Amino acid sequence: MTLAMRIEREQLQSHSAPRRRWVTVAADGSGWYVRLEGNHRVDRYPNVTQAIHRGRKLAHQHKPSGLVIQYQDGEEEELQYESVANP
């Protein structure tokens, strides 16, 4: 599932609920990058472990959010982080 498809699915689910923001962790020619959807800033890391750690932290800071890890072998992992419901 592409990022655009995930965003569309989230928008259709509810207009009253806050929209989920996605954090992407993926490899490029110079290591691994981490990017928060809607933000032009890209953080770069030399290895996947450091990039995933930063991606998880960023996703926790922007709940509701999701983390997408795109591995070099084509595998993709998706995690979702929800806000605590108000009583």
Image (cartoon, grey):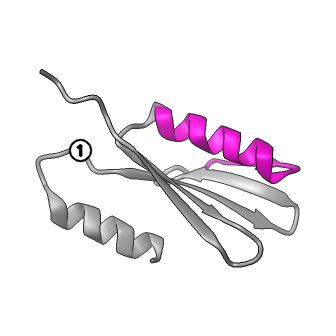
Residue at 37% in and 75% down: 5
Q: Amino acid at mark 1?
A: Pro
- Closer-to-camera residue (59/79): 79
Does residue 40 appear in this view? no
Whether residue 75 is situated above or below residue 63 in the rendered picture: below
Left/right of residue 51 with respect to residue 2 in the rendered view: right
Residue 59 part of the magenta segment: yes
Whether residue 46 is situated above or below residue 75 in the rendered picture: above
Left/right of residue 20 with respect to residue 47 in the rendered view: left
Which quadrant of the rendered structure holds the C terminus?
top left
Residue at the far top: name it.
87
Which residues are the magenta region? Answer: 41-60
Q: Which residue is mark 1?
A: 18
Which quadrant of the rendered structure holds the N terminus?
bottom left
- Closer-to-camera residue (19/87): 87
Residue at 35% in and 42% down: 64
Does residue 64 appear in this view? yes
